[in-house]
Image (tube, grey):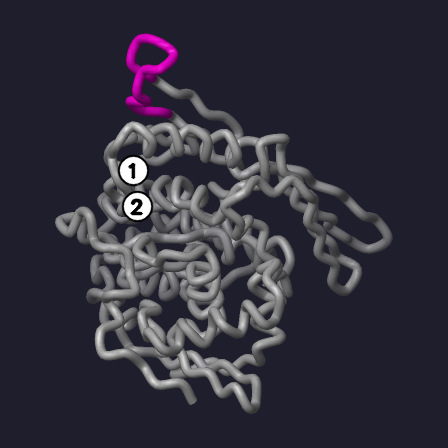
Amino acid sequence: MVSETPNPQLALIPERHPQYDLFICDVADAVLKDVMPQMEHPFYSLSKKPETSIRRYEHNGQWLQVTPSVKGLATIYDKDILIYCISQIMAKLKNNEPVSKRVRINSRDLLIFTNRGTAGKDYEALQDAIERIRGTTISTNIRTGDEEQTDTFGLIDASSIRRKHGLDGRLISCEITLSDWVFNAIRHNEVLTLHRDYFRLRRPIERRIYELARKHCGQQASWKVSLEVLLKKSGSKSSEKEFRRSVRELAATDHLPDYLVTFDEKEGMVTFQNRGTMKAALAPVEPWTGRLDSDVFGDARNAAPGWDVHYLEQEWRSWLGENEIVPKHPERHFVKFCQSWFEKRGRP
């Protein structure tokens, strides 16, 4: 086993804006689980150089293909923009405010939120990231009976950027229209919460390993995986020797948020142990205890045909508690929940 260093904070990027004490939501893995249940292939580039090759993953007759634009595949750092947008929408849902696919971004707020600098080069990098996300498309096949349908979609549908006057003027703000693919996942609450130190991880591979730990370990006590499988899941183009060194260093510095990493080099196994920090951060509040008007259950049955509406009411109340939501219009909110439930699961 590799021993840990006494101060893991030294391995993280300094916290540039400590007053921004926010947790964030990440839709990427959750969405892919919906598109392809066994999907674990990464579609964000881990390279800091433009990656223009097409990625394709196949499993049990299903396939998913990620096509970059001429400017390259969206990177794991570019994904920060989507995390910011999703977090804004989730915050509005929590406050029972209306949401839409179109999200307005204050550029400075985004840079602060993602623990970046606020110099001119940081604003320029932000525009490049938006263009890569806009240009990346995903195609996947959906099989029903003897028919096959191919869907192609992007991460965002459109973007609009505002600058100071002049071509070299600083980016002020922009608006991004999320794709239905992303927005529907948010509506169905298919999100994962990330530790705020995610933005302090220095290397792309560290971010990707953290994502995998969140997905596979989650709230469980631990997750054990072979180095070979972890390399495959990560999507890293590093050699096994280079990847081994990265995991060894990650275990030694012990700076991965939420999970303790240990690496048994002899057995070639990596273990992620839950620190319990996520559970503490996600402790749910008491579920809403108000009463629903009995007339709403007819609308609920129409919204979710075949489902026991009283069971759905229990699920809805638990969901309210987990997301700390106090509905301003409970009946309307409950019917919308039933509709989303049916859209995702169909008839029981």
- Residue at horizontal 71%, vertical 51%? 56
Relative to 121, 206 lies left or right: right
Image coordinates for residue 250, horizontal then vertical, percent: 40, 72
User: What residue sits 23% from the left and 72% below the top?
Assistant: 280
User: Is residue 124 part of the magenta span, yes or no?
Assistant: no
Q: CA distance from mark 2 to mark 1?
A: 6 Å
Q: Is residue 20 left or right of residue 267?
A: left
Q: Residues within 10 Å of mark 1 (few under 14, many from 20)?
A: many
**Residue 142 vs residue 343: left or right?**
right
Residue position for label 1: 110
Magenta span includes 167? yes
Element class at badge 2: loop
Pick whichever, 291 or 157, lies toward us: 157
Residue type at mark 1 is Leu
Residue 225: give x, y in percent of width and height: 54, 80
Residue 229, x across and y down, in percent = 61, 74
Question: What element does badge 1 sit on?
Answer: helix
Location of the N terminus (image quadrant): bottom left
Q: Is residue 228 above or below residue 162?
A: below
Numbered circles on residues, count? 2
Identity of the residue drawn at 55% across and 68% down: 242
In this view of the protein, which residue sits in the foreground, 244 or 152? Answer: 244
Tell me if residue 206 comes above or below residue 334 in the rendering.
below
The residue that label 2 is drawn on is: 114
Q: To which quarter of the image does residue 279 belong?
A: bottom left
Identify the residue at horizontal 64%, vertical 65% (top origin).
38
Kind of residue at badge 2: Thr
Front-most of 111 and 23?
A: 111
The answer to whether the residue labelled 2 contacts the one labelled 1, judged by CB atoms less than 8 Å apart, is: yes
Start and end of the magenta stretch? 163-174
